[in-house]
Amino acid sequence: MRRCAILILLAGCNTVSAEPHAAAPPLDWLTGCWESADRSYREIWSQSEQGHFFGYDVSLKDGSVSFFEQMRIDPGKSAMFNAYPAGIGPSPFPEKARTGASITFANPDHDYPQVIAYRTTEAGLSARISLTDGSNARDFDFVPCPIPQ
């Protein structure tokens, strides 16, 4: 009798199934070349490579590159944004929130920025960097541009 009760309990455990996790909305809207209206800043993102996105940005001053940064977004249960300012890094920023048209990454232990957020806009793409409390925010509004050859 005891053996039968244990088997019934074990069989009951096997019939409970976890709900499948909903897949995160894709980030394909990030892909492309984006530049500021005054063309002083440009950010370029690759198409997805099995969920990985590779990007770089450049700040331009008097027609020359004054700053550059390489970036990578790794897929996972939560995406990971890795920043390589001036080629140094990575500085990891785990995903904190995502919709079909936005994604936010945050690393409160990083000096600045601590939050990196992207969202689609009617004109193209918007990015914001800030501290975790929202202070020291810097906004970037981008329009599509041709990918440099």
Image (spheres, rainbow, N blue to C red):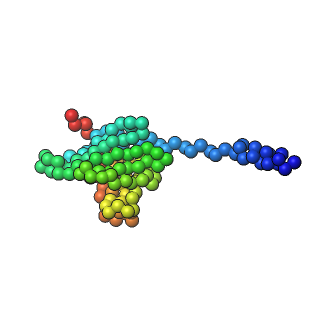
Quarter of the figure with the C terminus? top left
| Residue found at the far right of this picture | 1
Image x and y of residue 82, in percent:
35, 50
**Image position of 118 (left or right of 70):** right
Residues 134 and 13: in front is: 13
Image x and y of residue 132, in percent:
39, 63
Q: Is 36 situated above or below 133? A: above
Location of residue 47 (image quadrant): top left
The answer to whether any part of residue 58 appears in the image is: yes
Q: Is 50 situated above or below 115? A: above
Location of residue 91 (image quadrant): bottom left
Location of residue 48 (image quadrant): top left
Residues 117 and 90: in front is: 90
Residues 75 and 136: in front is: 75
Query: Looking at the image, how many numbered discs can be counted on the residues?
Result: 0
Which residue is pictured at 37% across the width and 53% down the height?
92
